[in-house]
Image (cartoon, coloured by chain):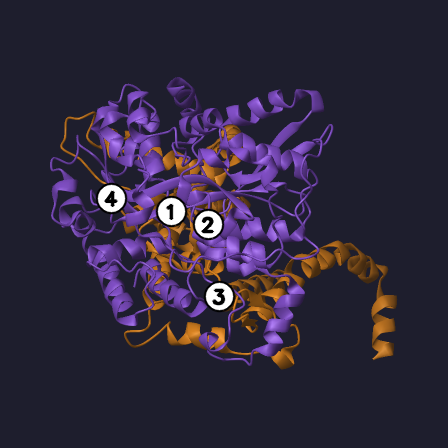
Amino acid sequence: MKKWLRSRFRSGRSDLFGVLLSLPAIVWLAIFFVVPGYVLLAIAFGTVDPIFRAPLPAWSPLDWTFGSFSFVFTHLWGGTDAFFGPAVLRTVGFVAAAMVLCLLIAFPVAYFVARHAGRWRGLVLALLVAPFWISYMMRMLAWVNLLQTDGLANRALSLGGLLPVQVDWLAGRSSTVILGLVYGYVPYMVLPLYAALDRISPSMIEAARDLGAGRTEVFRRVILPMSLPGVAAGLILVTLPMTGDYFTNDLLSGSPRTSMVGNLINEAISTPGQAGQAGALVSLLILGLLVPMLLYVRSTLRGQDVRS
Amino acid sequence: MVHDRAARSTGPAEPTGRGPSRRSVLRYSALAAALGPAALASCARDQPLGARPGASASPLKIASPTNPVIWPIATDNKPIAAGLAPEQNATLQLYNYADYIAPDALKSFEKKYKKYNVKVKVSTFNDASEALAKIRGGSVPFDIYFPSYDAIGKLATTGLVRPLTHDYLPGITNVWPEFQNPFYDSGWRYSIPFMVYTTGIAWRTDKVSENIGARPNPWNVFWDRKYAGKMSVLDDYRETISMALLYAGDSDVNTSNQVALDKVQADLLTMTRTSHPTVTINAYSDLPGGRFNISHCWSGDAVNMPYYLPKGGDPGILRYWFPEDGRGLVNNDLAVLLRSGQNPVLAHLFLEHLLDPAVALANLSATGYQPPQNTMTAEKLIADEYIPANLKTAAVLPGAFEIGFRTLELAPETDARWQAVWQRFKAGA
């Protein structure tokens, strides 16, 4: 073991240097991820003071109890008691729809910027990102105004009152929440896609053309496969925050019939006695999100292997 | 004065919005943070896991009008002596919900005690559990805190509040007699009343052609498909569950009866399906803003609504209904002194300032909420246009507390039942 270590370090100063360089990140992760993660588990596996109903974290795994987890599990699936279930399904549906929409919107935009914006690409990218200098909350509040019954959205749809369009956007509609999610997270899709598309060498495309591929063929057999890492990165980047989002739903709907997992967690946290449930829900959410994350990491590692 | 209010309303209207209410939020979460960690640990040891909460003797007394409670004064937490001079060069630290006190009330206090060079600073919170955690942490030595009356028990038993020295507070006689010796704090040892409010239904006559209040059971409007998607109920488990109880004809708004709560559960789920109201405490701005046509809200929200109408909007379209016979929810908030405060004398003087009728009027004018002052009769408030005539039902009448229902503090196991109903409702199952 020691020999191995020594050889590792002797084999190149760069290894030691690498460790040193990664130290800030490791410390950062330890303080802001590992420790809070453990606190989360201690609360999720902890108990609740029976009188004041405040969470009592169980710091030692020997003291862990599974009440919160079993509560969450029994209310997730099956039976009439599974009142968490609909919100989970809803979240999956909303996020899937929003993901697809994000991709459909972001791909042409990123493609245009990468291939056709020419010297304007810096400006176009900056403009795409510009609204996101304003906080997410303010932007959602702006949408609340735009989507009022007599708001700009309806006025635009009715062409200034010519057509009888009266959509109650804010009346607890799933579509509004999905659109809010798309609007909120689409730049996270554009940027990695842009990076991936920008990396495709024009000579590749020219080669494909020279070999007789038509436009669609070039797209299908060259551009799309080569942009897949960007698509994957973009999908991961939008999925993670959207799945835990509660705020979009709170502002744009506020109706229980559009409640998402994030809302379940938020509600549980602010209710005495339910902190453990919130912890369990968060743990499960993290576990659920780790799956696509690991798949992504694995696929990028494999990509590196191929390249090296 | 009314103009002052209009000016204020151009400011941001609590844009965060999603936090629980400024007034009743303590009901959610005061328990969560009330005891020190050591005490919690000892509770935990005494309580075997999985023990039925109800099986334990709660250290907390539950106050009710039929069971008034005198909160003890600990030997190490004696009231301050009478007749002390105010602190010099002090900054009085207030801890309150946003927009829940008139800026004028602060300024006039600074002016009144100018020779002591006093400053008043207000810190705000959105969520009472956040507030209590901060108070317990003691990082900021807040002098005055504004809880709901059902939090006073926890604050007093855990010694977070300072007992009052009545000599500084002759103005207590300005408030309604029932608040000079309230059931939740007999002998007003720790608290003075701050605001009173009812819970009712607000609507816009330009969008709703019927008189909601004329329905045999006006609460059923929240189950009326006709107004689906254009209504809101309060994001407050006590308020909305109580509303559903009243709708079902059950006036026990502190019930522990599981059958009644099951009925409420079914009714609330039906409500989500048929009329899907938004669950929010922002009706005071969103109803005049056009998002809702009918809202379950507090009387103070209704009084505030005219100032959130779009420019040129007619305030005459607003209506508020509270049961004519007074059989609806009436509640109140308090002002208390925190033990952590560094300026106990000035803090007493500030409470006395709040009891001053002129200051109380400024507070009503700025917040829409009504202090329970003897001089502020409903007729006078309407005549002086503090409350518009079309919203006169939003005035809290002195007799209201004799007839109205109060959402009292619940025993922990009952509270858990209520929260279970609420959890399922909010999950949108």
Q: Amino acid at mark 2?
A: Tyr
Q: Earlier in the sequence, mark 2 or mark 4?
A: 2
Badge 4: chain ID: B
Tags 2 and 1 touching, CB below 8 Å: yes
Q: Is residue A252 above or below residue A243?
A: above
- State whether discs 3 and 1 lie on one chain: no
Q: Colour of chain A?
A: orange
Badge 3: chain ID: A
**Which residue position holds label 1?**
B331
* Circle 1 Cα neighbour tier, 10 Å, few/some/many (<14 / 14–19 / ≥20): many
- State whether discs 3 and 4 lie on one chain: no
* Circle 3 Cα neighbour tier, 10 Å, few/some/many (<14 / 14–19 / ≥20): many
The Cα–Cα distance between marks 2 and 4, rounded to whole angstroms, is 29 Å
Q: Amino acid at mark 1?
A: Asn
The Cα–Cα distance between marks 3 and 4, rounded to whole angstroms, is 30 Å
**Residue A181 visible, this orientation:** no
**Which residue position holds label 3?**
A273
Viewer-side label of 3, 1: 1
- The dot on residue B24 is none
Q: Is residue A170 above or below residue B352?
A: below
Percent position of residue B250, x then y = 23, 60
**Which residue position holds label 4?**
B231
Give me the chain that's purple.
Answer: B
Q: Earlier in the sequence, mark 4 or mark 1?
A: 4
Q: Amino acid at mark 3?
A: Gly
Q: Helix, strand or loop at disc 2?
A: helix
- State whether discs 2 and 4 lie on one chain: yes
Which residue is at a point 62% across and 49% down the rendered structure image? Answer: B135
Which residue is at a point 47% across and 65% down the rendered structure image? Answer: A274
**Which residue position holds label 2?**
B149
